[in-house]
Amino acid sequence: MVVVGLGIGVALTRFSAQAKTVARQVDRYQEHHLGRGLQEAIGAWLRQQNGRDLLDVLEPTTGHAMDITLADGSQVSVFLRDAQGAALSNLTGRTDRQIEEGGLILRNLVVNTTNEQYLKLTRPFGPATISINSAPELVLDAAARVVAGQFSERLISELQTLRSQSVKITRTELTRASTSAGLSSEQRAAALRIFATDIQLWAVIIEVRAGRGMNQGRLIARYGGITQIRVNSRNNNSGNPMELGAFVTWKAISINDREVDLGDLY
């Protein structure tokens, strides 16, 4: 009886492990194809924007781009958010100047953050430039000190004033803020070199709401990933359409969190 009991227990354990493995494989398969399908849908939506700035067509506060109604009645909402605000942590293959300036920014972050904060404020891929519009305060401070040196406090104050107005900071406004802060021509050039006003790196956040049954309208799944979106300037006959790159990351996100932390997507 003991031997039979142990044999049954081992068999059930193996069956349970196999079932969990199959379930994980099915989940990965579904997420992979969901990502591919959404990539095609988002790409089609981007081509319809005729090269317009994404920040001008997205919903200002949420980044909502579009909704897709599926055959079962469920609704997929697509949100795009500027994901270039973190500092680049992998400087391999960059120019000597980018390595020097990027290294100084990372050093400033290390000094002023915890290990957990540092990981959330840095990214291992994407452009070396940092979004002037979405950079968290600690990243903005770390980069501004590299740009402006002894005038960094003035520059930070000018940039914070612009950001408090809740409007997109353009290249012209960045130059004007640098001038007002008393920066030299070399420092103004550094500001334009380190900070980005035209964004390439974007977070794509997907929310799925049930279309039928007792859960109708309720959030049942959420996914997110990072990709690059560029304007194709080579095809002038189609209004410079935007091109969506492959997802660099793609993962399921908890539906219990009210806000999505972009640091978890890098």
Image (cartoon, helix red, strand yellow):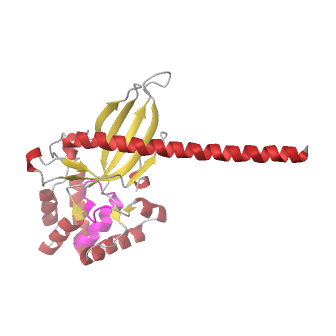
181 horizontally vs 96: left or right: left
53 horizontally vs 25: left or right: left
Identify the residue at image location x=63%, y=43%. Answer: 19
Q: Quadrant of residue 219?
A: top left
* Residue 115 locus on image (x, y percent): 48, 65
Q: Would residue 257 be visible to someone looking at this image?
A: no
Identify the residue at image location x=28%, y=35%. Answer: 66
Furthest residue toward left? 237
Badge count: 0
Q: Quadrant of the C terminus?
A: bottom left
Furthest residue toward top? 213
Q: Would residue 13 be visible to someone looking at this image?
A: yes
Asked whether 130 falls inside the magenta stretch, the response is: yes
* Residue 153 locus on image (x, y percent): 26, 67
Q: Quadrant of residue 141?
A: bottom left
Furthest residue toward right? 1
> Which region shows up in magenta?
126-148
Asked whether 187 falls inside the magenta stretch, the response is: no
Residues 58 and 155: in front is 58
* Residue 253 locus on image (x, y percent): 46, 45
Residues 109 and 68: in front is 68
Identify the residue at image location x=33%, y=39%. Answer: 78
* Residue 63 locus on image (x, y percent): 29, 42
Identify the residue at image location x=34%, y=57%. Answer: 136
Q: Quadrant of the N terminus?
A: top right
162 horizontally vs 117: left or right: left
Residues 213 and 61: in front is 213
Residues 143 and 76: in front is 76
